[in-house]
Amino acid sequence: MSIVLITGAAGLIGSEAAEFYMREGFTVLGIDNDMRQSFFGAEGSTIWNKERLEKQYPNQYIHFNMDIRHKEGIHQLFAKYKDHIALIIHTAAQPSHDWAAKDPYTDFEVNANGTLNLLEATRIYCPEAVFIFTSTNKVYGDGPNSLSFVEQEHRWELAQDHPYHKGIPEEMSVDSCLHSLFGASKLAADILVQEYGRYFHMKTYSLRCGVLTGSKQAGVALHGFVNYLMKCGITKREYTILGYKGKQVRDVIHSSDVIHAFDCIFRNPVHHGEVYNLGGGRDGNISLLEAIHLCEEITGNPFAYTYVDQPRIGDHIWYVSSLDKFKAHYPNWRQRYTTRQIFEEIYEYNRERWMNEA
């Protein structure tokens, strides 16, 4: 029996990874205690996705209602399955800027201490396993905001001849900038993942992700902007734009493309302790205003929003990931979803359920 252990298994990336590897014949151990509901209320709950996995894959999916902050439970689980765990995908997190400021202790305990628990358990019980961590572009703080942007009708942009026009590289400094407490806790975890790879020679990888999206995300106002935006478009709920004239740019990548990146690493884990930026890049980015217009096109509904001229603390004006490093190391990986396809899939998969909830 070959096992893939996934934290945050009922979330967007975790559930996509679980289904991918079960289709590949692996048994999946899913860790998820639906803490997302504690963070964001009932609308953020992932219970429905956990139940879907258990129903569709009763012989391959084993769920553990476990908190990654509880070291003893994590170690017991790893000890039980130590001879079979080939891959750990760590997606569990407190994922919101704004929520972190309300409760810094919980934010840090989940994001940093939880990651340490998983790394130590991996080192002790299955040190040859591949460990993949979903980090975030927020580790760069507001450093990208220091770039010289050109204001266009619906977006901020970099000049064609700017060295970062193709995207932000991994070499951008993580120092001397404002991160938000969420960004700081994720950066602590990111560095731990790197250090376990380099110090203990483990197969650890940190992927600094842009906007991860897909049809199965429980998007809420504080996290999962693409899904929440489409939900607002379908249900005619008013959306609030925070700062930058709504022209802030995000790179958007489908969860399936993320999982294929994971699998490239898993099949060829040669760059231990490595960091990669992973997002939509130049082929998959969109501003908030452009996303609103796209929602209107797809739903056929006028989009209602209000504007508040105050951005979130540490929020990016423009962030597009440079994918050059990852593509150089894994040239067989490619993006399969365009931004429009992502929005259309979210609409088709969720419109009936969201309308019934409205």
Image (spheres, helix red, strand yellow):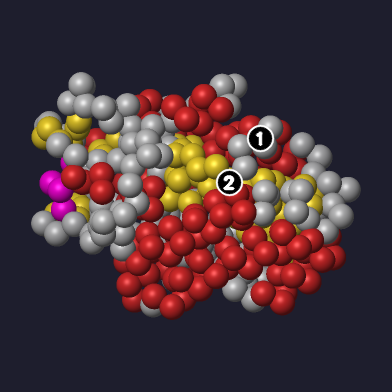
Residue located 71% across and 64% down the image: 121
- Residue under circle 2? 273
Q: Which residues are magenta?
A: 243-247
Residue located 75% across and 43% down the image: 22
Q: Which residue is at the far front?
A: 199
Percent position of residue 229, x then y: 33, 48
Quadrant assignment for the C terminus: bottom left
Asked whether, in this view, residue 284 is left or right of residue 244, the answer is right
Image label count: 2
Residue located 83% across and 60% down the image: 81
Residue located 83% across and 59% down the image: 82
- Residue under circle 1? 270
Mark 2 residue crowding within 10 angstroms, few (<14) / some (14–19) / many (20+): many
Along the viewing direction, whichever of 36 and 50 lies nearer the viewer: 36
Q: Is residue 10 visible?
A: no
Q: What's under tag 2, amino acid-wise?
A: Gly
Tell me the distance, in whole angstroms, between the alpha carbons under discs 1 and 2.
10 Å
Asked whether, in this view, residue 52 is left or right of residue 298, the answer is right
Please tell me whether residue 320 is drawn above or below residue 128 in the rendered image.
above
Percent position of residue 50, x then y: 65, 59
Please tell me whether residue 345 is drawn above or below residue 29 in the rendered image.
above
Mark 1 residue crowding within 10 angstroms, few (<14) / some (14–19) / many (20+): few
Quadrant housing residue 151: top left
Question: Magenta stretch mostly in which secondary structure?
Answer: helix
Look at the numbered disc 1 and give the secondary structure of its residue.
loop
Percent position of residue 155, x then y: 18, 35
Q: What's under tag 1, amino acid-wise?
A: Val
Badge 1 vs badge 2, beta-carbon distance below 8 Å: no
Q: Is residue 155 visible?
A: yes
